[in-house]
Amino acid sequence: MTLSSVRLQARRRFIAIAILVAGLGSALVIYLTAAPVPANPLGYNPEDSKQYLRQMEVYGGKTNELASEFRQWFENLWHGRRLAVTVACLTLLLLLFFWVASTPLPPQVGASPPRDQRPDRTKP
């Protein structure tokens, strides 16, 4: 290993640790300070009634009902303690992407060596 590859590895490790500390630290702060989700002021969610679900299915089909459920699930990821779990998962995905993207490719078989490693053929 050359000095430059050792420095590159150290820099990669430092950036990976910084991503991990910032992301998981933020997730921990969010988790500890998250307030409980307030109750619905109506006492119930109208979207949970059978009549509402039936009307959604009549007007938009089963796809409309599934899209509404997906939208509700996705909106719930961004509130309270679920937000902390979302931030932690996104941090791990970002770390994985960084680690894979910053991994140097192996040298190609049969490729010429870099200029500084080529033999000097100008001397007899």
Image (cartoon, grey):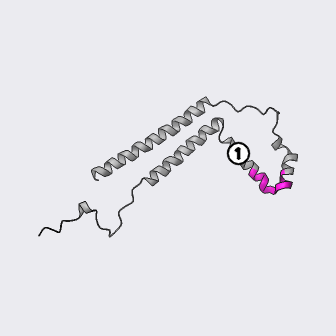
Q: In which quarter of the image is the C terminus?
A: bottom left
- Asked which quadrant contains residue 37, the reply is top right
Residue projecting furthest to the right: 51
User: In percent of the image, x 63 and y 31: which residue is there?
Assistant: 34
Rendered location of residue 5, percent (x, y)? 32, 52
Residue 93 colored in magenta in the image: no
> Is 6 placed above or below 25 here?
below
Within 10 Å of the Cα at label 1, are there few (<14), some (14-19), or many (20+) other Cα atoms? few
Horizontal arrangement in the rendering, residue 58 relative to residue 39 (left or right)? right
Rendered location of residue 2, percent (x, y)? 28, 53
Rendered location of residue 78, percent (x, y)? 65, 40
Magenta-drawn stretch, dominant element (helix, strand or loop) = helix
User: In percent of the image, x 79 and y 52: which residue is there?
Assistant: 65
> Is 35 placed above or below 87 here?
above
> Is 94 placed above or below 34 here?
below
Q: Give the range drawn in magenta.
A: 56-67
Amino acid of disc 1:
Trp
User: In percent of the image, x 42 and y 43: which residue is there?
Assistant: 15
- Residue bearing the label numbered 1: 73
Q: What element carries label 1?
A: helix
Residue 57 colored in magenta in the image: yes
User: In percent of the image, x 48 and y 41: which residue is there?
Assistant: 20
